Image (spheres, rainbow, N blue to C red):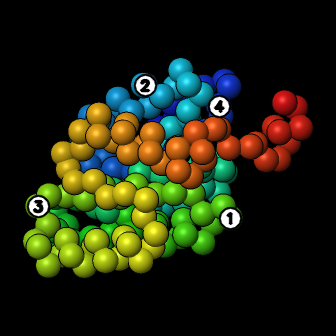
Amino acid sequence: MVNVHRQPDARFNVLLTQDRWRAPQQWTQQFPRLLEPQGVVSYTARSGREAMEITGRVEIHAAVLDVGTPLEDGEDQPQRSSGPEDAGLWLSELFRRLPGHPPIIIVHSATYSQRVLERMMHEALRLGAFSVLSKPVELERLLAVFQRLMDREYRGAWPARRGPQAEQD
């Protein structure tokens, strides 16, 4: 089930993915609540499949992708391998191919080995990630990175709306 934090006057859509679908991470709950009043709609996906379903329905302006996000619903991350072979980097590759190429913030586990972290960082850079954050994600740091993303990618302004909604404005 996709968790959507709706705002009637949405100006900016953010996709959030997480690796632990049974125990949502604190930042995935706080981030949407803080940005909703400004017109930011957050879509939280628990799997790569959910994330792709969201991107098929909604124009995404930015994404915060956990590299440990499972590919399919119901996969429990603690039973899986401890490397970034899951949906996070795969989704980054797909986002790179989307029209407008939404900027991506990558979140990774601090428990990865140095070798795995180096490989993941290399891949994140190759895919054009805007920033990479380690867990546990500090909300203040995420908000600061998000502000830099807005300033750099959107020059501090909301993106122009496309499609039928834009005609109504």
Whether residues under marks 4 and 2 lie with C-beta atoms below 8 angstroms apart, the answer is no
**Image check: 92 left or right of 166?**
left
Tell me the quarter of the image containing the C terminus: top right
Secondary structure under the numbered disc 3 in the rendered image: loop
Q: Name the residue type under label 2.
A: Arg
- The numbered mark at residue 10 is 4
Q: Earlier in the sequence, mark 4 or mark 2?
A: 4
Residue 162 visible somewhere in the drawing: yes
Badge 1 vs badge 2, beta-carbon distance below 8 Å: no
CA separation, marks 4 and 1? 20 Å
Question: Which residue type carries mark 1?
Answer: Pro
Numbered mark located on residue 126 in the image = none
- Whole-number angstrom distance, CA of label 2 to CA of label 3: 28 Å
Disc 2, disc 3: CB below 8 Å?
A: no
In front: 26, or 4? 26
Element under label 4?
loop
Which secondary structure, mark 2? helix
Up the image or down, 116 lies above or below 150; here it is: below
Q: Can you identify the residue that label 2 sits on?
A: 33
Q: Which residue is mark 3?
A: 111
Q: Position of residue 63 (x, y in %)?
A: 48, 52
Q: Label 1: which residue? A: 99
User: 10 Å neighbourhood of mark 3: few (<14), some, or many (≥20)?
Assistant: few
Residue 2, horizontal then vertical, whole percent: 48, 43
As measured in the structure, the alpha-carbon distance from the residue carrying label 4 to the one carrying label 3 is: 36 Å
The disc, 1 or 3, on the residue closer to the chain's N-terminal end is 1
Task: Check disc 3 and give the amino acid type.
Answer: Thr
Q: Amino acid at mark 4?
A: Ala
Name the residue at 50% across, 38% down.
42
